[in-house]
Image: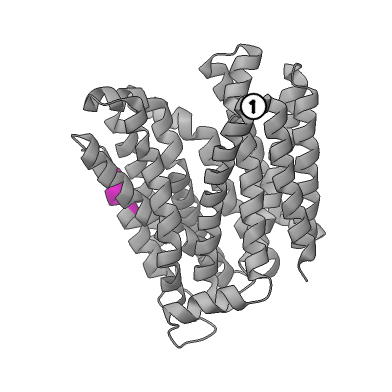
């Protein structure tokens, strides 16, 4: 690919990952307005977030093997179009059932799009360039964490909650146009179309594939057991309102974005496996320090920013490593990786809720550290 086409490709993938990642965060601040519009409870309306995540987690492994059989660019286009339709019609929903259906459609589109983003990068970029591009596109997830909530608030304030989904749709259209300009993917290593069964078999019986996926699962379970309840702890412990807490999350997201964006250069120096090890270890240290400085807001935010740096580099390194474990079945492997990420989020938030109720902030810090320690052990078992 020429330099100009590379830039268009990266931009298209970047904005696509941003809008699919920000989708759940955009809804968060406007849940009360949506529930009022539908005359339903907030708890029922919040299932719109759950449905999106569930359809993503289930859909990714189902649609993953398609990328090993068909042109990944076409699948990217189909996936982003399905996501666009689901998001657009969320804004036109007149009742909660319609809203649920549209959220499910958006989740299915994202489950087809996102794994093929990572697979497309792995197929079209190599070596140091792979590390750099993976870091840049991964940084879009960090940006969605930083700006998803304020973006949803800002768009809804233009008129009403419908604007949040229509604004997200405009960003998706921009990504769609850029992806249309992406060059056709390189020919796969094996030109024969691989059956579903063989795709799954190749992944599950390839050396290091399952352990690599377990790193994602344990890492994300550990991280989200802590991160899910971070906002609650900050508000209760420091008596901050939602706006100030939001600024702290923005500082985390922006720090994570910067390190993800430039993480490729660090991977070039350290290597992927060493980078995973170092940043998992640093994440454990910074999470423990957060508990040590839990009553000092300045040190607490500094440790949180350091954690964002470690997570940004570590997760980018992990994705860059996994995408090349099974080169002939990248789409299938990365679909399972995405599914394991959402499974980790589900397990982490579920276990974290129980631990936080019983043992407070110290409990979720320890639980998070245990998850990251297990991911370290699994990483060092890889050969």
> In the image, which residues are magenta?
83-88
Residue situated in front as seen by the camera: 198 or 360: 360
- Mark 1 sits on what residue? 358
Residue 238 can be seen in this image: yes
Identify the residue at the far top of this view: 239
Q: x%, y% of residue 356?
A: 62, 28
Q: x%, y% of residue 134?
A: 61, 58
Q: x%, y% of residue 3?
A: 56, 64
Mark 1 crowdedness (10 Å alpha carbons): few <14, some 14-19, many ≥20: few
Q: Quadrant of residue 282?
A: top right
SS state under label 1: helix
Position of 41 with respect to 234 (left or right) is left
Residue at 53%, 78% in the rendered image: 201
Figure check: 348 above or below 56: above
Position of 167 with respect to 362 (left or right) is left
Quadrant of the snapshot with the C terminus: bottom right
Question: Is 73 within the magenta?
Answer: no
Residue situated in front as seen by the camera: 342 or 366: 366
Q: Quadrant of residue 143?
A: top right
Q: Which colour assignment does the render follow?
A: one colour
Position of 381 with respect to 47 (left or right) is right
Figure check: 305 above or below 197: above
Decide whether the magenta segment is chiefly helix, strand or loop.
helix
Figure check: 176 above or below 309: below
């Amino acid at each position: 690919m020429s330099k100009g086409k590379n830039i268009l490709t990266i931009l298209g993938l970047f904005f696509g990952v941003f809008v699919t990642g920000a989708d759940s965060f955009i809804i968060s601040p406007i849940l009360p307005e949506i529930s009022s519009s539908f005359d339903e409870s907030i708890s029922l309306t919040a299932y719109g977030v759950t449905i999106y995540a569930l359809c993503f987690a289930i859909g990714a492994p189902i649609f993953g093997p398609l990328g090993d059989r068909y042109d990944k660019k076409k699948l990217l286009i189909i996936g982003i179009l399905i996501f666009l339709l689901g998001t657009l019609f969320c804004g036109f929903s007149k009742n909660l059932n319609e809203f649920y259906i549209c959220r499910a459609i958006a989740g299915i589109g994202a489950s087809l799009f996102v794994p093929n983003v990572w697979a497309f990068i792995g197929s079209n970029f190599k070596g140091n360039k792979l590390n750099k591009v993976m870091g840049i596109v991964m940084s879009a997830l960090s940006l969605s964490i930083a700006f998803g909530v304020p973006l949803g608030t800002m768009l809804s304030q233009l008129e009403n909650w419908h604007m949040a989904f229509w604004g997200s749709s405009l960003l998706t259209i921009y990504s769609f146009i850029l992806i249309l300009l992406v060059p056709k993917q390189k020919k796969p290593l094996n030109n024969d179309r691989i059956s579903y069964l063989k795709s799954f078999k190749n992944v599950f019986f390839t050396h290091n594939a399952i352990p690599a996926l377990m790193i994602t699962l344990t890492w994300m379970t550990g991280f989200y057991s802590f991160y899910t309840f971070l906002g609650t702890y900050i508000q209760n412990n420091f008596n901050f309102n939602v706006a100030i807490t939001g600024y702290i999350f923005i500082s985390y997201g922006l720090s994570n974005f910067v390190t993800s964006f430039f993480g490729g250069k660090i991977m070039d120096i350290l290597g992927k496996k060493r980078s995973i090890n170092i940043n998992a270890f640093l994440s454990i240290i910074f999470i423990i320090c957060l508990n040590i400085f839990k009553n000092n807001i300045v040190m607490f935010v500094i440790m949180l920013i350091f954690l964002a740096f470690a997570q940004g580099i570590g997760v980018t390194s992990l994705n860059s490593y996994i995408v090349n474990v099974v080169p002939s079945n990248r789409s299938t492997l990365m679909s399972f990786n995405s599914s394991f990420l959402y499974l980790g989020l589900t397990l982490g938030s579920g276990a974290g809720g129980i631990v936080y109720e019983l043992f407070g902030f110290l409990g979720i810090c320890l639980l998070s550290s245990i998850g990251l320690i297990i991911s370290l052990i699994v990483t060092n078992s890889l050969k």
